[in-house]
Image: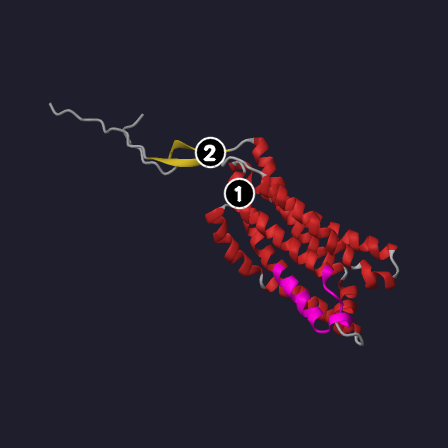
Amino acid sequence: MATATAAVPSVRTRSREVTATEPALVRRAVKAAALGNAMEWFDFGVYSYIAVTLGKVFFPSGNPTAQLLSTFGAFAAAFLVRPLGGMVFGPLGDRIGRQKVLAVTMIMMAAGTFAIGLIPSYATIGVGAPLLLLLARLVQGFSTGGEYAGASTFIAEYAPDKRRGFLGSWLEFGTLAGYIGGAGLVTLMTALLSPHDLVTWGWRVPFLIAGPWASSASTCVCAWRRPRPSRRRSRRPSPTARRSPCAK
């Protein structure tokens, strides 16, 4: 008599990488990245809200509209070089680590911001003033392009698998907090100082404050030594696994 041989169940499995993280480690990573974003956009907020005064300081007098357009032209130039910053600092973060790149971009932003506060006016050095302003803005835009992409990846690498999107949203919170902080500081100074004092020396204060502030923040990021998150492999049946019809 012929005997039927039952087929052996065939199940294909695949390995999945699961990020094993510690809550304290995740909190520190999110704080570092969000702080970096806040520092970057604080400088953008200061510049945009004090643009009218900067036009009077750095560009020839006579036409307020031309002064304002020239100031915003320098502001827009920073956005043109942001993709270049991402192209340079993205691969660099893959090679040397995103923590180091985050610290470098924050230092570059602080240097560009602090430099704006030290540039002499158009009445003092002529056309050199707007050229130096443009150079500082290009440095700021270049560093911002590298900072945002690196900070996003930085959080994604250290966030738990099921909270990655939520924790990544704190980058936008840092952006908003930094921009509001810069705008609020300029608004306060505009309310407290006379127009003459604001044009003479008051406009420099927000830029000079931002320099040491961002530098100290980048120092904290750079000094943070943390272990890399471990990854464990789990073997789970594939959703598309094929089972024999004879399997129970």
Residue 57, by quadrant, is bottom right
Q: How is the image coloured?
A: secondary structure
Disc 2 crowd rating (10 Å Cα; few below 14, some 14-19, many 20+) is: few
Q: Position of residue 25 (x, y in %)?
A: 57, 34
Locate the N terminus and report the quarter of the image it occupies: top left
Of labels 1 and 2, earlier in sequence is 1
Q: Describe the element under mark 2 as helix, strand or loop.
A: strand
Locate the C terminus and report the quarter of the image it occupies: top left
Q: Is residue 141 above or below residue 224?
A: below
Q: Describe the element under mark 1 as helix, strand or loop.
A: helix
Kindly identify which residue carries mark 1.
156
Q: Position of residue 197 (x, y in %)?
A: 86, 61
- Numbered range of the magenta stretch: 118-139
Residue 196, by quadrant, is bottom right
Give the camera-side residue of 104 and 161. 104
Q: Position of residue 167 (x, y in %)?
A: 59, 40
Residue 23 horizontal side relative to residue 20, left or right: right
Q: What type is the residue that disc 2 sits on?
A: Ser
Q: Judge whether residue 119 is colored magenta.
A: yes
Kindly identify which residue carries mark 2.
230
Residue 201 horizontal side relative to residue 112, left or right: right
Direction left: furthest residue: 1
Q: How many marks?
A: 2
Q: Judge whether residue 133 is colored magenta.
A: yes
Q: What type is the residue that disc 1 sits on?
A: Ala
Residue shown at 59%/64% (left/top)? 80
Residue shown at 71%/52% (left/top)? 210
Residue shown at 57%/48% (left/top)? 102
